Structures are given as structure tokens and as C-alpha cells.
Amino acid sequence: MTSSFTDLDSSATTPVSERVLAAMLPWFRERYANPGSPSPAGELAKNAVYEARAEIAKFLGAEPREILFTSGGTESNQTAIRSGLRARPGRRKILVSAIEHSSILGLVPDLIRQGAEILVIPSRSDGRIDPGEVSRLIDHETALVAVMWVNNETGAINPVREIGEIAHSAGALFHCDGVAAAGKIPVDVGTVGADLLSLSGHKIHGPKGTGVLFARHGENFYPLMPGSQERKRRGGTENVPGIVGLGEAARESGEFLALGAKTMERLRDRLEEGVFSLCPEARRNGPGPREFRAPHIANLRFPGTPGEKILIDLVREGIYLSMGSACASGSMEPSHVLLSMGLSREEALSSLRFSLGRGTVPGEIERTLSALSRILGRKPERRVS
Ligand code: PMP
């Protein structure tokens, strides 16, 4: 797809791919039946949902009965936290990392009102969560531990397998927000040992308003919206086109992981290298070693220059990105993720998140670097390959 702008904000959202759109279209009109209706057309829709569920299960290394379709990452996260708390009666503590998405942190006041005790797992200065901190905070009153796989602002990859083991050894459930990880690194529920895991359709070139919650078979599950659909785990007529699109998006994401993720990482590295060459005082917010970084995000700090100013100038040049999570932008409040890593308000506000997508091409990175050179009034300090 060619576009008149450069999208370096793919952590905010991604376009529906051609394949996803083609898979979805028939289910809006020709095949509009309710999967619950006792007719051949209903049967067809039911089969389509069945196949999409099988596809997602394969993508996550799960069983189809463990896959629940939702309206997005937010609903999946909130269902997971509320259900997880109830699944461990007699336990009232929840451990959440300081770098979780607002769809989890925003739930905290309500959980406290309901009698839960929330303990916040601090972030290391590189934006990763230290399993040692989880061990320090967990006890036999802990119902649930929630730590995201990849942070959506810094791209930091958390040691989720270790954290899951710590949760389980205390008898707690482990919830993992896999929204920013899916399609960028292999996401397998067996590897991570998660009991609950969330995905969002629109971050993997699927439709907005679609999501997945993996809920491990054998654990008690409490729906957010009771009803007869989804094996009584989520009420409401199935969003058949959305679900079909999500299944196709997962299939395509699996293929991309095998073929394209390395290219994306190289482009991300070229962007960073170019920025550091233009602006040697710039710093990366997040881990250094590549094994701790998802391939699509570079969160960079431009000391002494307000990020907002650079952002506005870049947007004027047709280059779209954001200062942190899209949900928080517009408010110009510093990112809670960067603050929790120990950055000052000023440092956080001089930071920008560049997030590459599957469609990002080398020319767009060069265009961004030329624009930055003009905006910052700098020339590359040294020749870069
Ligand atoms: N978790 C993370 C890490 C996210 O980045 C987002 C979206 N910004 C969500 C959850 C929420 O997903 P959705 O937009 O599908 O509700």
C-alpha cells in the first residue's frame, strides 16, 4: 500500500491488510447469518468462527477451547484481571507492573474499592521488570500477577517465563498482556506459562474492536459479560467478520515473523544509528541488548528539546509518530512508563516513540532522518553505513 505519509506510529494501530479485508468482506453481506441460528447459513458462520479460533489457537500454541473472542486488548485485559482475582477466593492481592498499559492500571481504583490490595512492581531503569521484585512482593495472599510481555512504549521484552514461574510457585495466576508482543516476537502460551493472555486485532493488521483472551483450560473463569456465546464466557452475538479477520491476521502475522521481523529490526537499528549520528546526545529509553528488545520500537530522548516540538514538526512533514501510548497523547502528560524507569518529567517529555510497521520501507527511515536533520538543524556527525 502506498501512502502520502510515513507511519512510524504502528504501535498505536495498523491498517487492515489486503488479505484480512478480503477474508472479512463476505461475512458482512452475503454470509451475514448469526452463528447461533439453526440454518445452513448459521452453520457456515459458526464454522468460520470455529476456524478462526483454531487459527488463533495455533498462533498462540493453545487449544481452541482456551480462546475467547473479545472487543479488543482492553476488554481482554480487564476480563483477565477481574476473573483472575475471583479465581483465587480468599486471596486479595494483585501484583501489577508499573509499566502496564492504562487498560490495566486504570482498573486499579475500582479494584481497591472492591477490597483488593494492589502492589505495584517497580520497573528497572531499562524498562524491564525484575523477577526478583516479583519474588519480593509475592506471598500466599496473591491472587494474580500481571506483567506485560513487550512494553508498547519502549519495546522492552520482559522475562515473563521466570515471572510466571514465580507466580505459580506462590499459587497465583499469571496474566500477560501480549498486545505489543504479538506479530513482533513469537508468542507462545506454553513458553511463557501464562494462565491468561491478551491480544488486540488492530495491532496486527486485523480490525479494530477485535481481541483475544487466552484463558487456560482447567482454571475457573468468570465472564465480564455473561451470556450464552463463547461457551458461556462472553455474551453477545459473535462479531463474525471481525473474528474471521482476526484469524487471518494471526495467520499472516505468523508468516511475517518467519520472514520479515529481521528486516524490521534492521530498519529500526538504522533509524537509531541515524539519530545518534545527527544528535550524539540523544539517548535510548529501554534496554540495550537486542535480545531484550522487540524489533519495532525505538523510544528516543532528545535532551533539551521538547519532544512535542519535534513531533509537531515531523507531523508537518508527513511523518506520524507519538510521544508514548496513543491513549495518553494529547494530554502532554509525561509517560508513566518513562517516569517509572526513573526519568525526570523533563526527560520523559523530551522523548519520542518511533514504532515501525510491517510496511515500513528503508526510504521512509531516510526521509525521517532528513526531516530530523532539518528540524534539529544538525548534520550527521559521522558517516553511517
Ligand atoms: N495493551 C497494550 C500493551 C496496548 O498497547 C493496547 C493498545 N494501545 C492495549 C492493551 C489495548 O488494546 P485495544 O486498543 O485493542 O483495546
Image: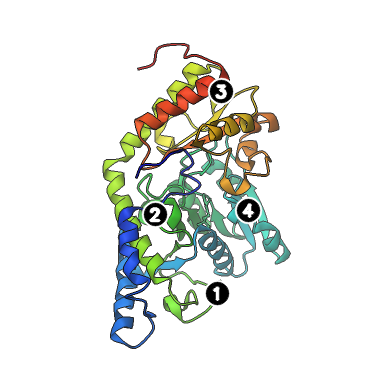
Q: Who comes first in sequence, dot 4 or dot 1?
A: 4
Task: Determine the secondary structure under disc 3.
Answer: helix
Which is nearer the N-term, disc 2 or disc 4? 2
Discs 2/1, front: 2
- Find the distance from the CA under tag 2 to the CA under tag 1: 27 Å
Q: Nearer the viewer, residue 378 or 225?
A: 378
Give the mark nearer the N terminus: 1 vs 3. 1
Instruction: State the SS at label 1.
Output: loop
Mark 4 is surrounded, within 10 Å at the Cα level, by few (under 14), some (14 to 19) or many (20 or more) other residues, namely: some
Q: Mark 2 or mark 4, which is nearer to you?
A: 2
Question: Residue under circle 2?
Answer: 16
Mark 3 vs 2: CB contact within 8 A: no
Q: What percent of the width, then of the height, locates residue 155?
A: 48, 39
Of mark 3 and mark 2, the one earlier in the sequence is 2
Q: Quadrant of the N terminus?
A: top left
Please state which amino acid type lies under the numbered disc 2.
Val
2 and 4 marks in contact (CB < 8 Å) = no
Amino acid type, mark 3: Ile
Camera-near label (1 vs 3) is 3
Residue at the spot x=31%, y=72% of the render?
A: 48
Q: Earlier in the sequence, mark 2 or mark 1?
A: 2
